[in-house]
Image: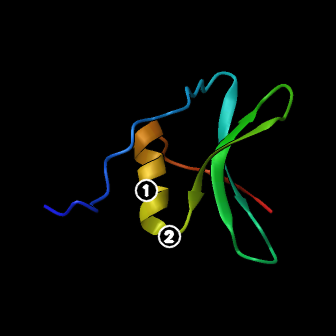
Amino acid sequence: MSIFSKKAKKAEFSFDPNKQYPVLRCSICTGEQVAGFRDKETKHFTEVMLIKDESDLEAFKQSYNISELVKEY
């Protein structure tokens, strides 16, 4: 076991599917992707995690039990 190994992350943000939906915000210019949740009423976006590769996206989906994300540009 390495001292620099990744720890399993717990869900830090409480996700309520009745009030929020998962969103993957993507930058057209830089390609940066940020996963988070958008409020259905106010449309406020809450950033949760920077997505660097496919493994980060899968970790986000697993930690919040999400099957699909809406992409926004």
Q: Residue furthest front?
A: 3
Mark 1 Cα shell of 10 Å, populated few (<14), some (14-19), many (≥20) = some
Q: Are marks 2 and 1 in contact (CB under 8 Å)?
A: no
Residue 58, disc: 1
Q: Residue furthest left?
A: 1
Q: Amino acid at mark 2?
A: Asp
Q: Amino acid at mark 1?
A: Glu
x 67%, y 36%: residue: 21
| Residue 19 place in picture, x, y as percent | 69, 23
x 43%, y 56%: residue: 58
- Which quarter of the figure has residue 2? bottom left
| Residue 47 place in picture, x, y as percent | 68, 44
x 55%, y 49%: residue: 68
Residue 19 in sight here = yes
| Residue 55 place in picture, x, y as percent | 41, 64
Between residue 20 and residue 68, name the one nearer to us: 20
Can you identify the residue that label 2 sits on?
53
Between residue 59 and residue 67, name the one nearer to us: 59
| Residue 69 place in picture, x, y as percent | 61, 50
Between residue 69 and residue 2, name the one nearer to us: 2
